[in-house]
Image: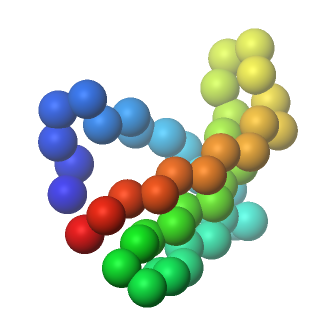
Amino acid sequence: MVGPGTHVITVGDNAQATVNGNELVITAVISSAGIGGMTAERKMSP
């Protein structure tokens, strides 16, 4: 499922993954150097 160009992120306990129709929606809180509490939402087709 992880391929070239895929970003690797670390998610906290508040990370949620839901399936909406044919789309996988992932909402996660991303922690990175200099950036904290940033919310990201990714939509991927199967």
Task: Return the x and y of residue 3 as percentages of the image width and height.
Answer: 17, 42
Quadrant of residue 33 within the rendered picture:
top right
Q: Is residue 28 left or right of residue 2?
A: right
In the displayed orientation, state which residue is furthest to the front: 21
> How many numbered circles does the render carry?
0
Question: Is 20 situated left or right of 1 in this image?
Answer: right
Judged from this view, the residue extending furthest toward the top is: 34
Q: Residue at x 49, y 40 (%)?
A: 9
* Residue located at (25% from left, 29% from top): 5
Q: Please say if 28 is above or below 18.
A: above
Location of residue 23 in the rendering, given as x and y in whole percent from the top left corner: 41, 72
Where residue 43 appears, x then y in whole percent? 47, 57
Task: Examine the image and state in which quarter residue 27 appears.
Answer: bottom right
- As displayed, is residue 43 above or below residue 4? below
Comparing 28 with 31, the one in front is 28
Residue 16 position in % (x across, y down): 63, 71
- With 39 as the anchor, is 44 left or right in this view? left
Q: Quadrant of the N terminus?
A: bottom left
- Image quadrant holding the C terminus, namely bottom left
Indicate the colouring scheme.
rainbow
Q: Relative to the observer, which residue lies in front, 34 or 7?
A: 7
Q: Which quadrant would residue 10 be assigned to in this image?
A: top right
In the displayed orientation, state which residue is furthest to the right.
Answer: 37
Specify whether 36 is left or right of 31. Answer: right
